[in-house]
Amino acid sequence: MQATIIKEITDNNGKVVPLWRDAEGNFYFEPGPDRWQISPNQGHLKWDMTVDAIIKDYFCENSYCTETGNFKSVSPFVIQKVQEGMRLAVTDPTGTLNKIFIGPSQQFPEPFPIAVAGKTGTAEYCDDVARANNRCRFGEWPTHSWTVAYAPYDDPEIAVVAFAYNGGEGASVAGPIVRLALEAYFCLKTLDSNPGSLAGCD
């Protein structure tokens, strides 16, 4: 049985109401309050608590799934916009990677010398380790920090991803790991092209 999916729609009177879709594809409005919980990730999403947690329809044996053969092409314009957004995460003063790559911050007082683009995020989920430590409280799931970045922005040659289990939110822990990995990469590149030079290798 597939879990119930809901979304919020605006009815003819301008009122926002939840619309539920069951496993058979039928749409209906608000079931009883004993049937749902608010999602911890997004307050406006709900799921059906009466459905088994394992959805057998989508189970893949041994973690391998049969390929669907369906591929989507993404317009270069879309890729360009994604890249621009990732660059803004670094260059905009409110960007999640600004303090890490532009600074100044206590850990990184100097800006990173090469143009970087990146994205941060927080994964919230419970696993066996969290359950064993009684950390799977609804709405207070453990948070795991992740960051991805690539450089140079205009002509990428390296991409780095860091995932910090129980690392908190966004770039708090994973961001500095990514910066240090990029620093090491460009330092080694400098040493390869100019042995004996430690320029940029602090």
Image: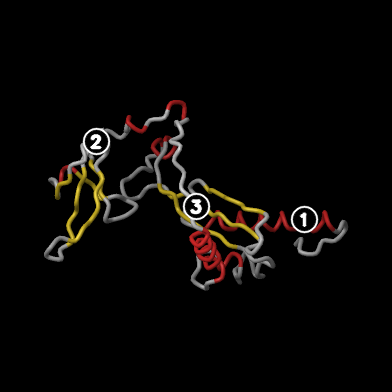
| Whole-percent x, y for residue 150 in the image | 61, 57
Task: Tell me what residue is drawn at x 24 percent, y 35 percent.
Answer: 51
Q: Secondary structure at mark 3?
A: strand
Q: How is the image coloured?
A: secondary structure
Task: Tell me what residue is drawn at x 32 percent, y 51 percent.
Answer: 40
Mark number, residue 145: 3
- Look at discs 2 and 3 and give the one toward the viewer: 2
Foreground pick, 104 / 10: 10
Residues marked 2 and 3 touching at CB (< 8 Å): no
70 displayed left or right of 21: right
Q: Is residue 114 above or below residue 62?
A: below
C-alpha span from label 2 to label 1: 53 Å
Q: Secondary structure at mark 2?
A: loop
**Which amino acid type is shown beneath numbered disc 3?**
Ser
Q: Which residue is mark 1?
A: 189
Task: Tell me what residue is drawn at x 50 percent, y 61 percent.
Answer: 82
